[in-house]
Image: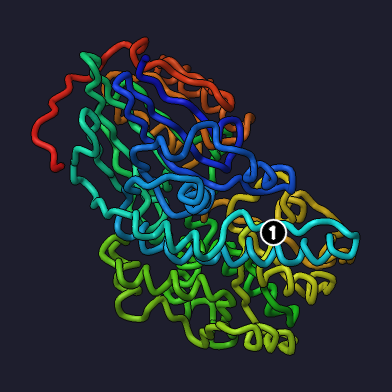
């Protein structure tokens, strides 16, 4: 048996991150185990059988807590996995919040579908996984701090480096010493921007034989952060002049904390004393507390605001209960409503869209990636009507997109990160739609002359067939 990496998710697409490292000695390590997200067809794939026996996996290395990277871990445990899940302690804390919320939504959706099926005389639908499955999963998490090199299994060493994407997000370095074959692979996870509001830049790595690299924005360049911050201030001014409200569909982890930081930092400049800011997401409220607990991982200015103000802007309100959320509907103007989900696929933002999307003085701000097939993507692409709970809602609101706040590096940032490798190792591009991956592949080949492949779902790379460019000093690794 050869030593190889198999691409079992986020291959030719953005979600469902899952890659399997198999050694000739029979060791099996899974890199991420994420949910497929977006369209109904994409999400239906979560119920398909894993392309391996979960009980045969020795360990999981989790790059970060976003559900498209961590969301199927409870299912993996439900189906027999019992090994350790290695991740940064901050990712462990965030995963606890996100997986519990995910199970709640999955169970709720199953109950709703079961009621619909019952009226047609059809059998009930079981949830993909339950709260009990999450509780069984959480004890398997093992904290692994940045820059700490450790032997996970005989012949497999690992070190996490700061990816600058969200709190605890990691680039994964893996050393393989397998029956005379020595190779090093680097999994980028999701890479943040070099200039982020709240996160430090991603750490550059010097050496690898294979780089598994994300490519979400491989075909474009973001607007500058300065321009995006200025535009956000202008949108607030425009909404205020129209006596309107601003809806911000935001990911509970990462984007929400970035927005809160900006509102706190620019409170006087943007006259936020004239606004009421609502964080309408129990999960985002919990996640913000985790960001505060791990403030030392943030960029210096953001760490200061996290410690001193807990990201608090003037007139910031936490809407934890459904009643507090519904009370926001009575506000005719002057409300900034930050709510999940970030792609408008569910959560409280859908209720706010139903209540306000048809009003011409409503402004909707998208500051994050919108996957194909999602309501958010349809709004960004100019839809004039949106279906919510079977009801068509006219789109009269003004739709804004701000690319400069993305938690993902753009083409220039991705190329800059790759430039840190001294011997131009082979690249496998994952976690991107075909347009982004293809464009980034061409750019990497042109700039660096490196071998690049864009694997499809189920494809694999034999590490033994790669040229070795790394002198592997196994050194002493903690067991």
Residue 10, image quadrant? top right
| Image side of residue 331 versus residue 176, left or right | right
Residue wearing tag 1 = 345
How crowded pointer 1 is (Cα within 10 Å; few <14, some 14-19, many 20+) is rated as many
Q: Considering only vertical position in the picture, is 372 above or below 346?
A: above
Look at 41% across and 14% down and name the residue there: 449
Residue 77 horizontal/vertical position (percent): 46, 50
| Image side of residue 333 versus residue 309, left or right | right
| Number of numbered tags placed on the structure image | 1
Q: Considering only vertical position in the picture, is 94 above or below 442?
A: below
Of residues 404 and 407, which is closer to you in this image?
A: 407
The quadrant in which the C terminus is found is: top left
Look at 56% across and 31% down and name the residue there: 11
Give the color scheme: rainbow, by chain, secondary structure or one colour: rainbow
User: Does the rendering let one see residue 407?
Assistant: no
Residue 130 horizontal/vertical position (percent): 56, 62
The quadrant in which the N terminus is found is: top left
Residue 160 horizontal/vertical position (percent): 28, 44
Residue 3, image quadrant? top left
Residue 205 horizontal/vertical position (percent): 27, 34
């Amino acid at each position: 048996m050869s030593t190889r990496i198999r691409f079992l998710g986020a291959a030719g697409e953005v979600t469902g991150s899952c890659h399997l490292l198999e050694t000739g000695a029979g060791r099996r390590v899974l890199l991420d185990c994420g949910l497929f997200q977006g369209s109904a067809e994409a999400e239906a794939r979560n119920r398909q059988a894993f392309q391996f026996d979960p009980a045969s996996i020795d360990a999981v290395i989790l790059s970060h807590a976003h559900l498209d990277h961590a969301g199927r871990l409870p299912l993996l445990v439900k189906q027999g996995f019992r090994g350790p899940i290695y991740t940064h302690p901050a990712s462990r804390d965030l995963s606890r919040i996100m997986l519990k919320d995910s199970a709640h939504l999955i169970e709720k959706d199953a109950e709703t579908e079961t009621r619909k099926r019952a009226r047609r005389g059809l059998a009930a639908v079981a949830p993909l996984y339950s709260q009990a499955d999450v509780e069984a999963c959480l004890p398997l998490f093992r904290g692994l701090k940045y820059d700490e090199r450790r032997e996970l299994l005989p012949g497999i060493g690992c070190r996490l480096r700061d990816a600058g994407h969200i709190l605890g997000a990691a680039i994964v370095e893996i050393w393989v010493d397998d029956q005379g074959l020595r190779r090093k692979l680097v999994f980028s996870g999701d890479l943040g921007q070099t200039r982020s509001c709240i996160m430090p830049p991603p750490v550059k790595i010097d050496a690898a034989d294979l780089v598994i690299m994300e490519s979400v924005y491989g075909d474009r360049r973001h607007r500058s952060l300065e321009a995006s911050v200025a535009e956000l201030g202008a949108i607030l001014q425009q909404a205020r002049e129209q006596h309107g409200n601003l809806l911000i569909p935001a990911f509970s982890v990462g984007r929400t904390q970035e927005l809160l930081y900006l509102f706190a930092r620019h409170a006087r400049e943007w006259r936020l004393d004239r606004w009421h800011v609502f964080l309408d997401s129990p999960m985002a409220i919990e996640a913000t507390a985790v960001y505060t607990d791990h403030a030392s991982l943030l960029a210096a200015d953001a760490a200061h605001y996290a410690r001193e103000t807990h990201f608090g802007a003037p007139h910031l309100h936490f809407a934890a209960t459904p009643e507090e959320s519904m009370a926001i509907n009575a506000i005719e103007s002057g409300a900034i409503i930050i709510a999940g989900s970030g792609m408008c696929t569910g959560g409280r933002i859908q209720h706010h869209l139903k209540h306000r999307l048809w009003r011409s003085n409503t402004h909707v701000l998208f500051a994050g990636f919108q996957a194909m097939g999602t309501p958010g993507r349809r709004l960004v692409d100019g839809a004039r009507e949106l279906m919510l709970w079977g009801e068509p809602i006219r789109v009269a609101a003004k739709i804004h997109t701000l690319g400069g706040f993305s938690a993902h590096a753009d083409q220039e940032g991705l190329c800059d990160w790759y430039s840190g490798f001294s011997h131009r190792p082979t690249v496998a591009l994952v976690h991107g739609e075909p347009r982004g991956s293809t464009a980034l592949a061409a750019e990497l080949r042109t700039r660096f002359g490196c071998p690049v492949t864009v694997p499809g779902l189920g494809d694999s790379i034999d590490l033994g067939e790669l040229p070795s460019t790394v002198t592997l000093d196994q050194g002493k690794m903690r067991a």
